[in-house]
Image: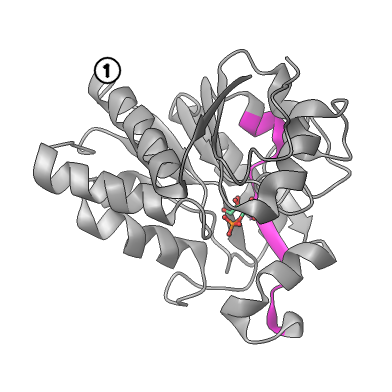
Amino acid sequence: MNVETFPSADAAADRAAELIALGLQASPRLVLGLATGATPAAVYKKLVERHRKGGLSFAGATAFGVDEYVGLPPSDRRSYAHYLSEHLYTHVDIDRSNAFVPDGMAADAGAEAQRYERLIAAKGGIGLLLLGIGLNGHIGFNEPPGDFTSRTHVATLATVSRRAHTQYFGGESAVPAQAITMGIGTILAARRIILLATGIAKAGPVRQALLEPVSPACPASALRSHGDSICVLDEAAASALMGQTAG
Ligand code: F6R
């Protein structure tokens, strides 16, 4: 896994946006996988800027959200469908019929997860996947212990993850208990992966993912087995690496 460290969160987001822009320029029909949350918000802002000022086009692209809460409709401001719409889709020229998020309101969430996995395959698989990392090393909502072969499925959120999302829901008990998430196997099948982590709170999980043995205890450590994965960090998130990274 290549590791790139930047002086600030803004510079790290700029690099992630640059990698996505380069991917789109090289392959206008690129299939993107997109995480949500606090970390990538700056990347989407920069992509919108590149679209407005630099003519970056998403017209031929397809996009898949990495995950969605079970029980939230796209109209709910806290849903990831709403997030991707507000942060990116409404501001660029992507064909909305090619922008997908799992349906959190599906009557059968398990069947919806399988449908989503099949849809990703039908679109040729993910070409470039942008991920964040959770405080417990989760990627998507693949909580420890992670199953490295899992495909899109219904996951139960870990307590630490629900706590981390309390701010958006006004209380831990209001955070949905489950999400539909790409599995680690789905993630590893992406042709290129960018893991973006910024801020001191991510220093521990980043260290675990990059330096400690690859283990289900840290789902993000699975990314080290991927042949084309890039970890983009700011100095705070890189601060526990002490100048060393494992393969
Ligand atoms: C969300 C997702 C999660 C987040 C992770 C970090 O779509 O896939 O794995 O990337 O929880 O979230 P932030 O960036 O809010 O710290």
Q: Position of residue 56 (x, y in %)?
A: 18, 36
- The amino acid type, in three-letter code, at marker 1 is Ala
106 relative to 16, above or below: below
In this view, the residue in front, 243 or 227, is 243
In this picture, residue 64 sits left or right of residue 179: left
- Residue drawn at (29%, 20%), measured in percent from left and top? 27
Residue 227: quadrant of the picture: top right
**Residue 14 falls left or right of residue 90:** right
Q: Quadrant of ligand 1?
A: bottom right
Residue underneath mark 1: 26
Query: Residue 141, position in %: x, y?
Result: 70, 52
Magenta residues (range): 174-187
Which quadrant holds residue 57?
top left
Q: Residue at x 76, y 34 (%)?
A: 209
Q: Position of residue 93 (x, y in %)?
A: 18, 47
Query: In this image, 7 relative to 57: left or right?
Result: right
Question: Is residue 126 rendered magenta in the image?
Answer: no
Q: Quadrant of the N terminus?
A: top right
Image location (x, y in percent) of residue 111: 67, 52
